[in-house]
Each structure stands twice: as C-alpha cells, then as structure tokens.
Image: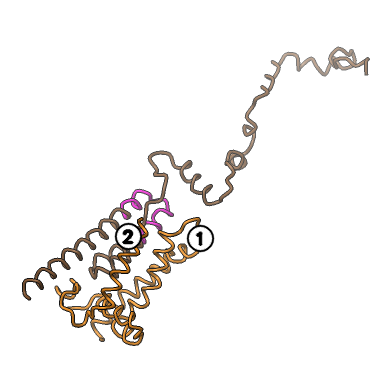
Chain colours: A brown, B orange
Amino acid sequence: MEKWQPAHTLPELTELFISNEQTPPTPPVPPNVDPTQEMPNSAKQYFNQPIYNNQQYGQQNNRQMNQPGNIPAMKPDNYLVWAILATVLCCLPLGVAAIVYSNKVDSLWNSGRYEESIKASKTAKNMCIFSVIGALVFSLLYFIIILFSL
Amino acid sequence: MRNGVIIITIAVVLGILFTVNPETASFMPKCAFHQLTGLDCPSCGSQRAIHQLLHLNFAKAFAYNPFMIISLPYVVALILSQWYNKKGKFEKLKKLCQHPVTVWSYFILLIAWWIGRNIFL
C-alpha cells in the first residue's frame, strides 16, 4: 500500500496519459449539488413532490402548484343544500335552476375550469337568495291581502 | 346559540303545521307559482302533507305530495352532512348526497313529478 503512486508517474503507463493531459480537467462536482439534476423528468417530479398524510390534501395542493396565476385556493361552496331547500320550500322555478348551477360547481372545478366554477357558485347563490326573497315577499303580500279582506 | 335558534324555529313551524290545518286556514302562506299560473309546483301540498304526517296519517300525507315525503330524508341527510359534519362524521353521507348521480336523479325526478302531476293528476 505504501508504494502506491499516481498512475501517470509510472513509466509503463505514461503513454496512456499523454492525450489526457492536453484536455482540460473536468470541474469537480460541488458537494451541495442538487440530486435531482441528473434524474429524468418523471423521477424529478416524484422527488420534488411533498409527501402528505392525506392524499386528498396532496392532490389539492398539487393542483394549486401546477397552475400558476390567480387560481383560488379552495373549491367554492356549491350551495346545494340551499338550492334544494329553496326548491322544496319556496315553490319557485328559480330553485330548480339553482340546483342545476350548484351541481355544475363541483364538476367544473374538478375539470379545472375554476373561473366558470366560481361563476356557477355565485349564480346558484343569487338564485337561492332571489328564490327566498321572492317567496317571502309573496307570502307577506298574500298575508296582508288576507288581513285586509277579512 | 345558533343551534338553539334553529331548533326553536323548526319547533315553532312544526307546531303551527300541527295545530293549523292548511287545507282550511286562509292565512297560511300559499304557493306563488300556483297563485300566478294555476299550475301545481313540485312542492304544492307540502304543508298539507306535513300536517297529515304530524298527525301520523301517512297515506293521506303521501296522497297530498309524495315527492315531499321522498324529499324529506334527502333534505335531512344533506343538512346533516353539510352543516353538522363536525370531525368528518358524515363524510360518506356527504359524498353520497352530493354525488352528481344523486343530484341529477333527484333533479329528473323533480321535473318528471312537476310535469306529471299537472298533466295526469
């Protein structure tokens, strides 16, 4: 072991190193190199992906990370409960339209059409509100008419 | 506090519906759609149906508005899973209630009932 020496100093091997000495030496690899540098893209993605306990949260976060720009963080409320309550209690066709819009919210969001999803959510909400107001106003008017006609 | 208000409101409404017969009382709120068009809306007859339901006349209740009787469990499940889903207890129920297939089935049933009751009944 003590007799070991660099290979190019040995006379028998000098021939092998002649060509190598002219080419510039390759730069040494810095110690804090990114381990993902040499990986193929698919592997890199996997490496960079944070691990979540809950798969659902992971999916949601991925969606946020992959879409640059003003992507909202949370799925808008679909107001399905209000829409069905408005339909069942208010007797106005508006409630039926509200059900359609509130059902659109989730499917649009899941297919990545966030803007339209938020729009549908707002439309559903407004329809529920108008439905309730309409029913209340009508009931009140009816009540007043009955009171006066008694 | 919020729950108390909701429970009292529901109790008052059910109490009124129990004591007053909507069939004969003139001051009970009437359906706007029915008053304006003369046609029945999907939930016309709900007050009478619930009145009969509270008096345990299930057959009469069903005759007034079968759609209302079918809707009640769905509405209760929706409200429970949406607003009382603390600790994710009703997560499965919520998924079932808000599944597009469920909602579209309910929607088609609603439209069919709306058209059907005005043509055939």
Q: Residues within 10 Å of mark 1 (few under 14, many from 20)?
A: few
Q: How many marks?
A: 2
Mark 1–mark 2 CB contact (< 8 Å): no
Please state if B23 lies on the left or on the right of B3 as rendered: left
* Secondary structure of the residue carrying numbered label 2: helix
User: Is the stretch drawn in magenta largely helix, strand or loop?
Assistant: helix
- Residue drawn where x is 42% and y is 44% of the image: A73
Determine which quarter of the picture holds residue B85.
bottom left
Instruction: Mark 1 vs mark 2: give the one in front.
Output: 2
Q: Is residue B48 above or below residue A68?
A: below
Determine which quarter of the picture holds residue A50.
top right
Q: Which residue is mark 1?
A: B89
Q: Which residue is mark 2?
A: B5
Please state if B31 lies on the left or on the right of A36 as rendered: left
Q: Residue A4's spot in the image, x, y percent?
A: 90, 16
Q: Residue B69's spot in the image, x, y percent?
A: 35, 78
Per the rendered image, the range of residues in magenta is A102-120
Q: Nearer the viewer, residue B15 or A82?
A: B15
Q: Amino acid at mark 1?
A: Lys
Q: Amino acid at mark 2?
A: Val
